[in-house]
Amino acid sequence: MRDTITIGIIGGTGWLGRSIATALLDSGFVGLESLILSSRSGELKGAEGSLASVQVTDDNQRLVGLSDVVILSVRPEDLAAVKIDLADTLLVSLVAGVSLHDIALHSGARRVVRAMPNAALELRTSYTPWLANEQVDGPDKILVQRLFETCGEADEVFSENDLDYLTALSGTGPSYPALLAKALYDGAIAQGLSETVARRAVTGVVVHASQLISETRGFEALLDTLVGYRGVSAAGIQGMTAGGLAASVSAGISRAHEVAQSRLFDVKVPGRTE
């Protein structure tokens, strides 16, 4: 990693931008003097801890001029309003459904990375896949990997399709476990359990017991062991499998993948061509 870098986060006052900024500061990846955030108001309301003293601006191009790396953390529908020209500044885009090509065309950036963290970033346990264009060199890639390791785990992937698929899989964060929790909860309520007991039981399964997956030999080995006992767990696993759980999960991921591939932003940049 370079000795001293300044990181700017456009959209840095939203939940995602704040979470990354906090992780960067708390990990020591950058100091307060090397971090700048932008927002429409130029303010960071309700900031606490390390964020309370961070520099904030309402001028995105000023942020670009002060930064070695710019993280773009806005929603796809808000991207058109972000007027920037990055030239040779490294751009890391967290905008879902917008390709490397389109981000480069919109921003004027030559060196572009797409990345897709998830909501676990708030807990520093996000899984963040990222994809770089051909102009991003080895030192840049090392920097990006270390940057996202302040927020959890990260991997470089090598195609837009892979990143779009992972947007549908890991980028959705807690949505699929929450859906499973809701199904388990509804079943418990239907059996006459109280809401308190049902909620605690489901949380114990989905949140707490599932941690054993990462602490043992992995989910395949764990399933094989449980099915091998031929007891209550095996009956539940076999019943869900026979009921089409795998097919339902596959259908859901496929639909999410289609949306991730639908390219949620139409680049229209007067005066710029491919």
Image (cartoon, rainbow, N blue to C red):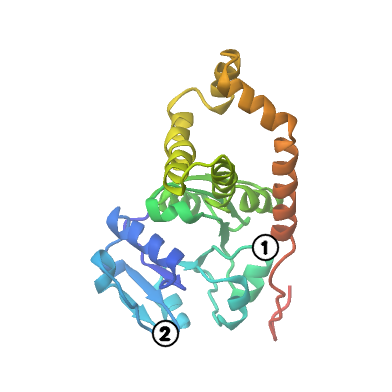
Q: Residue 52: percent from the left, percent from the top? A: 26, 72
Give percent across and percent down for residue 6. Answer: 36, 66
Left or right, 186 with reference to 250? left
- Vertical position of residue 256 compared to residue 107: above or below: above
Q: Quadrant of residue 63?
A: bottom left
**Residue 106 image-quadrant placement:** bottom right
Residue plotted at (48% across, 36% down): 205
Relative to 24, is 158 on the left or the right?
A: right
Q: Residue 12 vs residue 176: left or right?
A: left
Neighbour tally class for label 2: few under 14, some 14-19, many 20 plus, Cα within 10 Å? some
User: Which residue position holds label 1?
Assistant: 99
Residue shown at the point (37%, 55%) measured from the top left: 2
Give SS at disc 2.
loop
Quarter of the rendering occupied by the C terminus: bottom right
Which residue corresponds to the image point at 43% horizontal and 54% vertical from the top-left?
Answer: 121
Q: What amino acid is found at the position of numbered circle 1 in the picture?
A: Ser
In the drawing, what numbered circle is on residue 58?
Answer: 2
Amino acid beneath label 2: Asp
The secondary structure type at the circle numbered 1 is: loop
Coordinates of residue 145 in the picture (x, y in percent): 46, 49
Q: Nearer the viewer, residue 217 or 112?
A: 217
> At which x and y percent is residue 73?
50, 68
> Which badge, 2 or 1, comes first in the chain's sequence?
2
Report, in whole angstroms, how far the alpha carbon at label 2 lies from the one at label 1.
26 Å
Q: Residue furthest top?
A: 229
* Quadrant of the image occupied by residue 75: bottom right
Q: Is residue 107 above or below residue 256?
A: below
| The label number, if any, that marks residue 197 in the structure image | none
- Comparing 209 with 39, the one in front is 209
Point 45% across, 51% down: residue: 120
Look at the numbered discs 2 and 1 and tell me whether their residues touch, using CB distance below 8 Å.
no
